[in-house]
Image (spheres, rainbow, N blue to C red):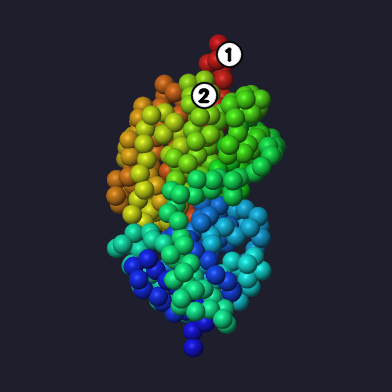
């Protein structure tokens, strides 16, 4: 007898096995990544979402905290074909519902055909299908989570000192930053000043940054109004860089626009083509929105599968952004050079200003 239920917005209720009890709701999405479940489950970009793993066995190399991208599990729930006890116990310890013994192929196909959708989960000995349906019906669209940044951002400024290397101060707007983004900068010698997602221009100016970096994060980029205002304030004065949501926030602040995708890109094998070199690299991605109108920025990289914008640059404004995750974690390291480009931009811009 099943002790877990998954209610989908299309009216279906799927039976499953409870691995971590609870009731919850969120936007149903999937990732095709076959490794990196620790990183995915701690990625702040999954806030307010229910994460389905398309790979059939999750947990086959244990749970290691050194692989976490944040201090806690971020999705509202996890769905898999089979979860190991290690992962199930970890999720239960964080009060995050988890279910398995369900046909994840059906879920992935549904999301691909119908788009990311509202979902409710009820798991545990007293769970009912009606409980799951009630959760699904109470689910809000991602665009309605107007304060989602507060769930994933630092509340006070923090400084991460860089290793020996470049002498660069990075002001990073934390809209849900993965830890490996910060370490990718500090490993190269940069001092990273992590600021709350709603930091003011005065907060940023106090850092005297060589580059303003907007991080990844969850939800609709149009809800990150304060971050857009900061970008607008410093555009043309300080180099700008961004990853994932950061690309979208910067584009919107500079006069462009974004749109919601049907089911987004979530996985570790998204091919991206550089239009300047014709080189194709494999990338890690996790986003449900994309840039529609690029404003004053030049498209330099596109997705091979669907031609969506993957990279934007501007020599005039000193801007470099990427829709994918160059830091990977999990995934390929083909694009780690992005962080070198960011720091080169910061130092070259500083030299020009000094002249």
Q: Which residue is mark 2?
A: 233
Q: Position of residue 341 (x, y in %)?
A: 50, 33
**Which callout, 1 or 2, points at the residue further toward the start of the chain?**
2
The part of the image, by quadrant, that contains residue 206 is top right
At mark 1, the secondary structure is helix
Q: Which element is circle 2 on?
A: helix
The image shows residue 166 at horizontal and vertical percentages of 63, 30
Residue located at (59% from left, 50% from top): 151
In this view of the protein, which residue sits in the foreground, 19 or 139? 139
Residue 134 relative to residue 165: left or right: left
Query: Is 5 in front, or is 135?
Result: 135
Does 256 sit left or right of 90 as displayed? left
Is the residue marked by circle 2 packed among few (<14), some (14-19), or many (20+) residues within 10 Å? some
Estimate the spatial distance between the alpha carbons at disc 1 and disc 2, rounded to whole Å. Answer: 21 Å
Above or below, 41 relative to 353: below
Q: Quadrant of the C terminus?
A: top right
Instruction: Give the label, 1 or 2, closer to the camera.
Output: 2
Q: Vertical placement of 75 versus 278: above or below?
A: below
Q: Give residue 153's quadrant in the image.
A: top right
Residue in the image at 63% along x and 36% along y: 195
Where is mark 1, residue-wise?
A: 354
User: Would residue 245 be visible to someone looking at this image?
Assistant: yes
Which numbered dot is residue 97? none
């Amino acid at each position: 007898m099943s002790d877990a239920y998954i209610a989908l917005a299309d009216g279906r209720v799927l039976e499953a096995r409870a691995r971590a009890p609870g009731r919850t709701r969120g936007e149903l999405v999937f990732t095709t990544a076959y490794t990196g479940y620790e990183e995915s489950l701690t990625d702040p970009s999954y806030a307010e979402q229910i994460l389905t793993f398309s790979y059939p066995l999750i947990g086959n190399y244990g749970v290691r905290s050194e692989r976490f991208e944040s201090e806690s599990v971020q999705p509202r729930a996890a769905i898999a074909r089979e979860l190991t006890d290690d992962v199930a116990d970890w999720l239960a310890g964080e009060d995050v519902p988890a279910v398995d013994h369900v046909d994840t192929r059906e879920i992935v196909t549904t999301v691909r055909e119908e788009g990311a959708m509202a979902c409710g989960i009820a798991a545990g000995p007293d769970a009912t299908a009606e409980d799951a349906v009630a959760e699904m019906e109470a689910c809000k669209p991602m665009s309605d989570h107007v304060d989602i940044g507060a769930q994933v951002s630092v509340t006070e400024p923090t400084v991460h000192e860089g290793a020996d290397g470049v002498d660069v101060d990075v002001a990073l707007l934390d809209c849900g930053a993965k830890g490996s983004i910060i370490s990718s900068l500090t490993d190269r010698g940069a001092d990273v000043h992590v600021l709350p997602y709603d930091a003011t221009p005065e907060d940023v100016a106090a850092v005297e940054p060589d580059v303003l970096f907007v991080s990844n994060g969850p939800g609709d980029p149009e809800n990150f109004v304060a971050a857009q205002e900061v970008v607008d304030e410093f555009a043309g004065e300080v180099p700008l860089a961004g990853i994932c949501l950061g690309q979208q926030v910067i584009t919107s602040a500079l006069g462009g626009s974004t749109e919601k995708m049907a089911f987004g890109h979530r996985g570790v094998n998204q091919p991206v083509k550089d239009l300047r070199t014709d080189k194709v690299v494999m990338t890690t991605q996790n986003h449900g929105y994309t840039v529609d109108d690029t404003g004053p920025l030049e498209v330099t990289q596109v997705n091979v599968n669907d031609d969506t914008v993957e990279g934007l640059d501007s020599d005039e404004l000193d801007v470099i952004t990427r829709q994918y995750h160059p830091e990977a974690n999990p995934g390929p390291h083909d694009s780690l050079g992005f962080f070198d480009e960011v720091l080169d931009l910061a130092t070259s811009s500083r030299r020009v200003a000094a002249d």
